[in-house]
Image (cartoon, rainbow, N blue to C red):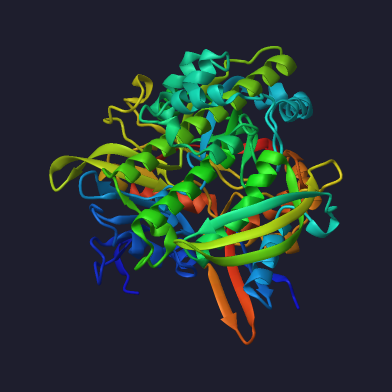
Amino acid sequence: MELKRIDGNTWEIPRQGAMRVPARIYASHKLLKAVQGDATLLQARNVACLPGIRRMSYVMPDAHQGYGFPIGGVAAFDLDEGVISPGGVGYDIACGVRLLRTDFTVADVEGKRGELLAEIVKEVPAGVGKSGVTRLSLAVLREILAKGAEWAVDNGYGTPGDLDRTEERGRMRDADPAGVSARALERGIPQLGTLGSGNHFLEIQKVDKILDAVAAKAFGLESEGQVLVMIHCGSRGLGHQVASDYIQAMENELGVEGLPDRELVAAPFRSPLGQRYYRAMCAAVNYAFANRQMIAHWVRGAFARVMGSAGGMRQVYDVCHNVAKQESHEIDGRETRLCVHRKGATRSFGPSRRELPEAYRGVGQPVIIPGSMGTASYLLAGTDEAEALSFGSTAHGAGRVMSRHEAIRRFRGERIRDDLAARGIELRAASWKGVAEEASEAYKDVDEVVRVSHEVGLGRIVARVVPVGVMKG
Amino acid sequence: MERYRILPHAADGKFRAFGRTLEEAFANAALATASFMWEWDKVAPARAEAVDLRGRDPEQLLYRFLEEILYLFETRRFVLAAVEGVVIEPAPEGRRLRAVFRGDELGSATGLHGEVKAITYNEMRIEEDCGGWMIQVVVDL
């Protein structure tokens, strides 16, 4: 495949064949090598062939092969001429990350770490097959799908201040619960307020290094050693079922002939089916917002009980990294409404975007990039230049490089626990096998992903954070 | 005959399932899917769940069939132990599949070791060769 180097970390697949636009890859030599080993670039090229795609098909530094669209892919489509694709959002709709800051330092929690983790584990259901503590009625679930985190706050889970610091204020207003199937609702009922398993986790972290003091202060990070809490999870079975339902509905209505990959199936955005998917997806996003809102509330409760107070535990931000949104961007010098798909990519809006809360208009939005289990995570600030580079998007994590099967063969969960303990990180997990699967060696180097993001200008590094306590689903 | 084989995949779960007939390959694909979550051979076939679904083509039929395992697990806490009586036949606008899932309710004795989030079409293959069938699926973990 023809690949042109634009500059140090920027590569391009020129327009060829059925491609309507070029594909652009942001990667160092090392990261590029990883994506050349799988179908990522081919998938980025397939995306570039979809109707109504504007500017380029983008690939973020942490990309790897996905379904239809690559993970770490960003693609924007014209609302009138373009499409919306469930495969461009992914199965775990609104999978995302929430970061909370506290007034505590690592010294404050040192003797109480075990107790804190135990309390959080007690409060937050995690792992395969775990049910939430709340048995929901269908009527309440529909309300959650319409209102998202706003429902949670109205019902005593957290404060309105949390909503100010959540993308979309925790509620996608275009949501239509009526487009969510009975099967999806059934899967959603037992799982609200659960973390799930796989790569999902909850970490107690400390600020390791502040690299941009002004932005850090705006985000609520004042000093190295300050304690933070990071929550990584999504819309659970409900979101997976919404994705599956609409992939099949689009197959049935539009056919699969000529699709190089069935999860590339896409409906015109303005068509009835396109709108039904878009609105059902928004409902699943709301489920994820409510889910993380409830979990954050329980974590606050755990801190209050163990530490005597929640210690100024305030939300830094909540970001979705699997989502499609209507946004305005400049195309050929004209402000244009687009449907921006981010699949395994984080929005990275700079100071001038009006979508940002007041508090972040001077510095750009917080971009939360979780590392793999037990390794560093990063807080970045969105930049205005990212708009021209990637429709205001950057990476979403480290990205896997080793199969789970191989990880289980090579690593033992108990051994990882001991290694982490030796580095001062306490681990609680629902399954040792699950821990082995998530060994940090199975992931790309998050430092490299973030460095490229910073150098290219997709997001500016604000702080590096490291875990002190890990709860894995 | 080997029922299925797990293949390496960087991010997700990939397998190939085999059968002398398409129906047998479907049944083994169900067991392969379950194997990412629990040890199906250690589950008692205490309960039955009837499966009856349609698909526009063999791929969609397989996708829906395997998704049924996730649906029954998440909504009824049903863990699959065996698949019986798979029948696949032509139906208006596609194909119909009927089968019986045998298994048990998730209990403390059932060890769970992973979660399949979704079935995918990625690299899906349904092929007939030298007197048998091969099914390849990647599931989202």
Q: Nearer the viewer, residue A334 or B131?
A: B131
Q: Nearer the viewer, residue B91 or A68?
A: B91
Whether residue A207 is visible here, answered yes or no, is: no
Position of A326 relative to B59 (above/below): above
Q: Quadrant of the C terminus of chain A?
A: top right
Whether residue B105 is visible here, answered yes or no, is: yes
Q: Percent position (x, y) of residue A441?
A: 64, 57
Left or right: where does residue A133 sit relative to residue A165?
A: right
Q: Tell me the residue at 82%/60% (across/down).
A: B41
Position of A276 relative to A256 (above/below): above
Q: Tell me the residue at 55%/22% (across/down).
A: A140
Left or right: where does residue A378 sit relative to residue B1?
A: left
Position of A422 relative to B120 (above/below): above
Left or right: where does residue B19 sit relative to residue A328?
A: right
Q: Percent position (x, y) of residue B118?
A: 57, 51
Q: Nearer the viewer, residue A20 or A392?
A: A20
Q: Nearer the viewer, residue B123 or A461?
A: B123
Q: Percent position (x, y) of residue A337?
A: 22, 39
